[in-house]
Amino acid sequence: MKFEDFKLSNELLRNIKEIGYEEPTDIQSRSIPLIIEGKDVIGESATGSGKTLAFGAIIAEKVIPNQGIQALVITPTRELANQVKDSLKLISKHKNLNITAIYGGVAIEPQMNILRRAEVVVSTPGRLCDHLQRNTVNLSKVNILVLDEADRMFEMGFIEDIETIIKSCPRERQNLFFSATISDNIRKLARKYMNDPVKVSANNIVDPEKLKQVYYNITRGMKLSLLVYLLEHEKAGLVMVFCNTRRNVDFIVKNLQHNKVKAIAIHGGLSQNKRNNTIELFNDAKVQVLVCTDVASRGLHIDNVSHVYNYDIPKNPKDYVHRIGRTARAGEEGKVINILSEEDHPNMSAILKEYTFKIEKMEKVMIERVNTIRIEEQRNFRRVPFHNKFKRGFSRQRQYSRH
Ligand code: ADP
Ligand code: MG
């Protein structure tokens, strides 16, 4: 399919071309024609598969300047709200719409003025509910309602806020729910609030031709040393290192820096300003290594990530899918490197029970243990001498492969 096959205006087609999209992705091909027809759509496809344009196209076509808030997009995180807003601006460039991202963690007053002028609002659920309560947002003109990453919003416990928001919109409206996975919760919400929805699913998850997944077995004490070694030896573009806890994120960033690898952190404990700066530094490739937790990274569309490292294996298999979805996007190649120690095996097994991935076992490499500093001590900038530099290999453990 080509973009020209959809009933889109010439202006929109030109914007799409200018952004650099040559042909629609699978989810775009399946959903845009239905959405343009005015149908309510539930769209299921993996992270990175191009869902933003799927709902962005109708917003660009339908919303009229100076007529109040006509399109509302709800996203689970602040970063995602910003990114969706930026994408929508590009998609609807010809109309010069007032598109705004609304989220918590920043002052609420300035948002009130902005909301008065907005035609498109991209918001996290909590802050929008605050505005509803204060009567500082008027949703009476909304005719397109989008839930982006609906599964994640359920996981984060936003359902009550979402229902409050939906009930504040006019009955006559088009509903579009997008998600990487469609759970029973989403189906229930759809039955309650959507009008005869059509469900479309894109060919999901990952293309094994493009995405190579490997693992190393190693003792816990040698994980950081292996990470440093691989970051130095693997030819890579932008790299994301995932951890299960904020504490590990801090530990790794400090210790990568200590070992002369430039890296930055993003997790929920950092201020919004700091997070925005971090994303910018990383997107501009000023720092090549981003260390993060699942929540903070969710939905970010950072291009050109060549490597995803799992320093810990996530407990929830879906998080693994979301992590690996950061790379090999839009037809590019990518590599996932899992650094496993004994503690990670139950989580890895759970993932492989749910998904069939081919994850190749890597040979032992002889590496040196690097110096590490504990994060508490880092505050005083004291260095802890570490003398036991000796060579160590990896222990042989379980094998992971496709069954
Ligand atoms: P999702 O919301 O499904 O995670 P996004 O909408 O964020 O995916 O898109 C992921 C990446 O793919 C973005 O960098 C986006 O610019 C790019 N992209 C989207 N549609 C296309 C397309 N048709 N061709 C090439 N790249 C695309
Ligand atoms: Mg998205």
Image: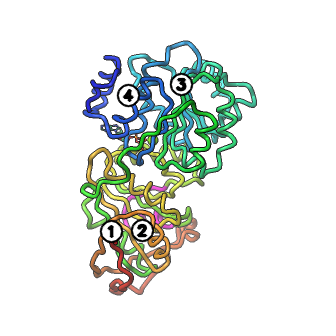
Query: What residue sits 31% from the left and 79% below the top?
Result: 367
The span from disc 3 to disc 1 (Cα, nearest Å) is 42 Å
Residue 87 shows up from this direction: yes
Disc 4 secondary structure class: helix
Q: Tell me whether the residue at label 1 lies in contact with that at label 2, contact meaning CB atoms closer than 8 angstroms.
A: yes
Task: First in sequence, mark 1 or 4: give its number.
Answer: 4
Disc 2: which residue: 352
Disc 3 secondary structure class: strand
The span from disc 3 to disc 4 (Cα, nearest Å) is 21 Å
Task: First in sequence, mark 3 or 1: give its number.
Answer: 3
Task: First in sequence, mark 3 or 2: give its number.
Answer: 3
In front of the other: label 3 or label 4?
4
Q: Given the image, on which type of amino acid does mark 3 rest?
A: Val
Query: What residue sits 55% from the left and 40% below the top?
Result: 75
Q: Report the residue that reaches farthest toward the top.
A: 66
Query: What residue sits 49% from the left and 65% below the top?
Result: 314
The span from disc 1 to disc 4 (Cα, nearest Å) is 37 Å
In front of the other: label 3 or label 1?
1
The span picked out in magenta is: 250-265
Mark 3 CB near ligand 2 (8 Å cut): no
Q: Tell me whether the residue at label 3 lies in contact with that at label 2, contact meaning CB atoms closer than 8 angstroms.
A: no
- Image disc number at residue 120: 3
In this image, 112 relative to 44: left or right?
right
In front of the other: label 1 or label 4?
4
Q: Mark 2: give few (<14), some (14-19) or many (20+) Cα within 10 Å.
A: some
Residue 149 rendering spot, x and y as whole percentages: 51, 44
Residue 136 rendering spot, x and y as whole percentages: 70, 25
Disc 1: which residue: 359
In front of the other: label 4 or label 2?
4
